Image (cartoon, grey):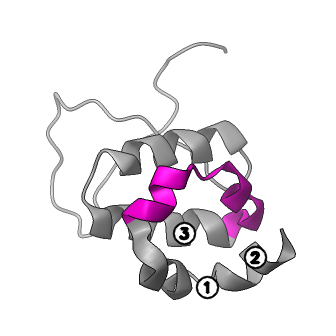
Amino acid sequence: MTGLYGKYKIEKTDGSPIDPKALYFVLRLDTDKSARRALRAYALLQSTEFYVDIMKCLLSIDPNMVEDLAAYEFDLLGIEKIKDLKLDAILAKN
């Protein structure tokens, strides 16, 4: 099958019911570079704290994503946040 279709069954980890009318879209981050880019774009629209959490996750999967970061993302994170992400070692390589 190709295209958009119901491929996954979604349930909450605590077992509570989900809204049967809700729509979900699943991204596989470990193998799909486009999924990682999509999540990064989404994170940029959220709070700085959420963005930092997402970037920690994404950079742990693909450290080379640091090369895709725009200057304004470094501004958004601030130098302390970059050190929190342990990017200084990655940045030293470039």
User: Residue 13: which quarter of the image?
Assistant: bottom left
Q: In this rendered view, identify the residue nearer to me: 87 or 94.
A: 94
The image shows residue 77, relative to residue 92, as above or below, that is: above
Dot placed on the residue nearer the N-terminal end, 1 or 3: 3
Tell me if label 1 and label 2 are in contact, CB under 8 Å.
yes
Residue 13 showing in the rendered view: no
Q: Is residue 53 toward the left or the right of residue 22 in the image? A: right
Per the image, label 2 sits on a secondary structure element best described as: helix
Residue at the disc numbered 2: 90
Percent coordinates x, y for residue 8 in the rendering: 48, 38
| Residue range of the region highlighted in magenta in the rendering | 61-76
The image shows residue 35, relative to residue 12, as above or below, that is: above
Q: Is residue 89 toward the left or the right of residue 58 in the image? A: right
**Where's the N terminus, which quadrant?**
top right
Please, what is the three-letter code of the amino acid marked with disc 2?
Ile
Please, what is the three-letter code of the amino acid marked with disc 1?
Lys
Residue drawn where x is 46% and y is 52% of the image: 72
The residues bearing labels 2 and 3 have C-alpha atoms spaced at a distance of 15 Å
**Where's the C terminus, which quadrant?**
bottom right
Q: In this rendered view, identify the residue nearer to me: 40 or 88.
A: 88
Please, what is the three-letter code of the amino acid marked with disc 3?
Cys
Q: Which of the numbered marks, if any, corresponds to residue 86?
A: 1
Residue drawn where x is 67% and y is 49% of the image: 68
Give the mark toward the camera: 1 or 3.
1
Percent coordinates x, y for residue 65 in the rendering: 69, 56
Q: Which of the numbered marks, if any, corresponds to residue 57?
A: 3
The image shows residue 65, relative to residue 60, as above or below, that is: above
Residue drawn where x is 42% and y is 73% of the image: 78
